[in-house]
Amino acid sequence: MNPVVGIAAFVAVTLATAAIGFYGLRISRTTGDFYVASRTVPPWWNASAIGGEYLSAASFLGVAGLILLSGTDALWFPVGYTAGYLMLLLFVAAPLRRSGAYTIPDFTESRLDSKAVRRVTSLIVVMVGWLYIVPQLHGAALTIRITTGLPSWVGSVAVVVVVCLTVVAGGMRSITFVQAFQYWLKLTALAVPVIFMLLVLAGTGATPLAEPVTNPTGLPSAGLYQNMSLLVALLFGTLGLPHVLVRFYTNPDGQSARRTTLIVLGLLSVFYLFPTAYGLAGRMFAPDLAQSGQADALVLLLPGRLIGGTAGDLLSALVVAGAFAAFLSTTSGLVVSLAGVISQDVLGGSVRGFRVAALISAAVPLAFAFSTDSLALAGSVGLVFAFTASTLCPVLLLGIWWRGLTDAGAIAGMVTGAVLCGGAMVAGAIFGSAATPFWLAQPAAWSVPAAFAVMVLASRATRSRVPSTTSRVMTRLHTPERPLETVRQTAERQSVQGQSSER
Amino acid sequence: MTRVRVTAPRSAARPAVDSREAAQESEVGQVFVRSLIRSQLRLGIVVAAGFLLILVAFPLLLGLVPGLAALRIAGIPFDWLLLGAGIYPVMGISAWLYIRSAARNESRYRDLTEDKG
């Protein structure tokens, strides 16, 4: 591929991101703006932003790559990534918004009235965020290497630098605009080349849709256990993703949090049609990428292969731009939520602290990314979902729906899930993908139930520790907002309280 | 440009107790709240179970009905269409039904509690 194409695409996305970030910066003035965009973002914007933030390297490059490698088995990935939002809607969206907390640690602390729970939750949120940023940086490294021929590290470093600049400058308000823009950019970047490729194929009429079921690598297909375990991880992992949850606080009330989720489901459903199309087309026209271990580059290379000349270059540039939008948006979303947690818990919650925390949140996974190899992108993100499903998901679900949860139970369950799932991930990394037994490669099917069981049993055993505030908090989580009070009045009331607590 | 220190309380964005919450903490108030929570949880579980049944039915259908996997519509294999596209409308419809019913549960709760004055 022409190296100019890749560099031009990256620069264009960066400039667009910076421009929108700057536009947002001019209206990001107050305390609330900095963390959660003042809760004034309309549902369509908010849903686009959630989509923009959620569709990461794994969705943009990894899903198509995995479909190329393993065919219909890999179709469970986009299904799970989307269905996770259905679970989020059913069990978390509205109550979490009504809790009035900014972050997951805020939620667990106020629900269980315990600083210790807060600290454990914060630690896990930071681990999840770092684990999730690493594959984004691997994706950036791959994209830069494939499209420009520059060394891999340039891609990771470029993404980290751009993200730090945006986050440090603008906070959430500009992030919301940037993310919303990036959802539509990613959708366009995948959809337009697909349409062109279909036109070209229809024009030549050369290859009918021959044998997409042929297996280019000869790998055995995944068993029932792997598919089901993956589905558990993806369905329940989405519930606990810190960068997704922080978006729900930007809805004005519980019912609009639900409407936002419905729109997100629609946006994701439309989006995932395209990686699936790339994977299917890749099985027909580019099976050699699977054999040469470059499956994750399928989305980047296919338009150039099927459509030559300037048109091919332009379409490739569009796809590369979309890929960078994916790395940038997910990484910046994660960095914002991690920085929120780190600055509140360690650095005292000032804007300056937030900025320092943002730098820390981006620098650590960069070091990780340098010291680890890129696995299949969708697979490594799948493991992060298994980790959140085993740790944050039980504490959120039981915290929202079960009065019997205690601080001791929550900590015991989260630690169990983290040790089991984290242990499986480490063991998998040591054994290598070929030697890892199947139940260890996909731990969610046993680590998630184990975390739930320990959390319930430990809470039962420490029944006397159920906080006295439980009734009041449960009421707040589940009762609808007072219809008489408008959003503006709520905001005013809160700002008055903010000022009075300052004195 | 003005820079503002982040001074808002970290959690508890709403006041600890207002008059409405005090009323809800009465014994009668708690009966309504508990029944609202139960009905919302039941609704969530019913919708989730329904969706998961359909999801699991898809691969079973492909496995049990011979020839279905070999079927092609516009050249695309049927199993790819089913999992790659057909499942998404099911999700959308489940979500839409849930939102309607959840809002209905809440307005029923509101009617009950506001009658009390």
Image: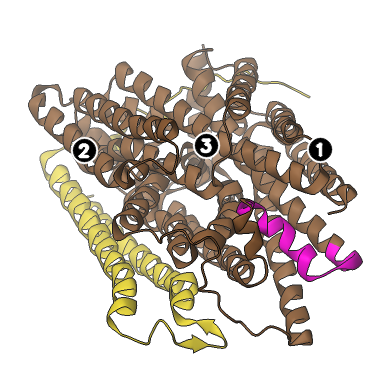
Helix, strand or loop for disc 1: loop
Q: Is residue A293 visible?
A: yes
The chain containing the residue under callout 2 comes to A
Q: Who comes first in sequence, dot 2 or dot 1?
A: 1
Rendered position, A193 above or below A46: below
Please state the extent of the stretch shown in magenta in the rendering.
A294-312
Q: Who comes first in sequence, dot 2 or dot 3?
A: 3
Rendered position, A100 above or below A147: above
Q: Amino acid at mark 3?
A: Tyr
Q: Who comes first in sequence, dot 1 or dot 3?
A: 3
State how far apart marks 2 and 3 are (Cα): 23 Å
Q: Amino acid at mark 2?
A: Ala
| Residue that mark 3 sits on | A132
| Residue that mark 2 sits on | A450
Q: Colour of chain B?
A: yellow
| Residue that mark 1 sits on | A150
